Image (cartoon, helix red, strand yellow):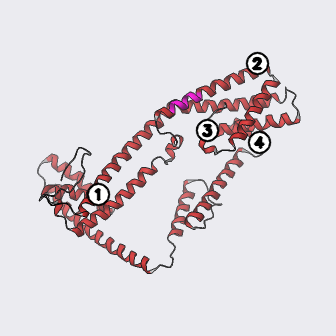
Amino acid sequence: MKKTTESESIIKIVSNNKKPLTKNQLLFNKLTKKIEELEREIIEEDANLNKLLTLFSKKARPLIEENANLRIKTSMFLAETTSKVKYTKKQSENVSDVIVYLCNDAFRFIVPNEEQEKFYDSWAKTTYQDELKEQSNETKEELSDFMKNTFGLDIDLKDLGDDPEDFMKFQEKLKEQFEKPKKKTKKQIQKEAEIEAEEEIKNKSIRGIYITLAKILHPDSEIDKKLKEEKEELMKKVTSAYDNKDLPTLLKLEMEWVYNQTQNLDKLSDSKLKIYISALKEQVAELEMEKHSIRLNPRFSDIQDIYDESEIKVLVREQNKNLKLFENILKSFEESYDKKEILKFVNDYIEEIEESEEVDLFEDFLNFGFE
C-alpha cells in the first residue's frame, strides 16, 4: 500500500515487479483517488457552506428582517394616509396596490405576526393563508408537470399535504410508480441477469471479506491494550458494514488490513479486481450525488446563490443602503404627509414592480430593496 502527499490514505496499486499496470489496475487507482478527492471536497463544501451560513445569519439576516419590517411599517403608514390625504380614485387604487406589494416583498423574508397578517388581509384581495395555499398548489402542479414530462409519470399532487408525513407518503407513491412492472426487452432481461449474477458474486465477496477481517481484527486475540481498543472500534465498523452490505467500506478495510500487510495488492486476480472496481464506481456515483446535493439542503436555502464571503459583503452594503433609504422616506412622509411626495414614491414603486415582472424574479431573490 502506498500513501501519497495528495491525500492521507489513497489506496493505490503499485507494481512490485516493474511490469506496467493493467487497464483494470489503472482504473482501480483512478477510482480510489477520485473517492478520496470527493470525500475531501464534500467536507470542504459542507464546512464552507456552514461558514457562509454563519456569516449570513450574523451580518445579513438581521438587516434583511429589519428591511422587511420597515416595508410593512411603510405600508401601514400609506394605509393611514388614505384617511388624511385626498386621493383620486386612480391614486387610491395605486396606493392600495403598493400597500399589498410592500407586504408581499416583506413576506418573502419574514413570517408575519398576527397584527401584520390581519393588516394584510384587510387590504389584499385574498388572505395571507389563502395565498400560501395557492402557492403550495402551484408548486405541486409544477412538480406534477415535471414528473410527467421528464419521467412519464402521471401523479396527482392536489391532495398532498405540507407536513413531512404527507411527503413521505408521496415518496412511497413515487417509488411504486417507478417500480411498476413494464414489458422488458431481451436486452433488458439479459442486463438484469448480468446484474443479478454480479450481485450474487458481491454478496459472496462480502461474506468472504467479513470472515477474513474478523480473523485479523478480532480483539480477543490481541494482547496489546491500545491495539485491542483499536481493533474493537474497527470490528464495529466491519460488523456495521457487513450488516448493511456496504461493500465499498469492507473493501477499504480489507485493502488496508489485509493487502497492506502482505504488500500483494498488485496480485489481486482480475475477477476480484472487477468486483472492487464495480463497488468503487458505485461509491463514486453516491459521493458525487452527495456533493451536488449539499447546497440543496433546506438548511442552506438562504445562501443557495451565495458562493463566497464577498457576495455577503455586497449584500450587507445593499441592505444598509436600502434601510437608510426607507428610513428617510418614512421619516419624510410622517413629517409632512406631502401628497406629491407620497404619490411619487407610489408611482416609482409600481414602475419598479412592473419592470421586475418582466424578468425572472428568482434571479433577484436576495436583491431586497427599493432603489
- Tag on residue 109? 3
Q: Which residue is mark 1?
A: 249
Of the numbered discs 1 and 3, the one sitting upstream in the chain is 3
Give how far apart the Cα atoms at labels 2 and 1 are.
70 Å
Q: Seen from this angle, which residue lies furthest bottom?
A: 186
Q: Residues within 10 Å of mark 2 (few under 14, many from 20)?
A: few
- Tag on residue 335? 2
Of the numbered discs 2 and 3, the one sitting upstream in the chain is 3
Amino acid carrying mark 4 in the image:
Ala
Amino acid carrying mark 2 in the image:
Glu
Q: Residue at x 26, y 45 (%)?
A: 6
Of the numbered discs 4 and 1, the one sitting upstream in the chain is 4
Q: Are marks 4 and 3 in contact (CB under 8 Å)?
A: no
Is 315 one of the magenta-colored residues? yes
Of the numbered discs 4 and 2, the one sitting upstream in the chain is 4
Q: Looking at this view, is 353 or 299 the one in front?
A: 353
Q: Residue at x 49, y 71 (%)?
A: 179
Amino acid carrying mark 1 in the image:
Thr
Q: Residue at x 26, y 56 (%)?
A: 29
Could you tell whether 19 is left or right of 119 in the image?
Answer: left
Give how far apart the Cα atoms at labels 4 and 3 are.
18 Å
- Tag on residue 124? 4
Q: Are marks 1 and 3 in contact (CB under 8 Å)?
A: no
Give how far apart the Cα atoms at labels 4 and 2 are.
27 Å
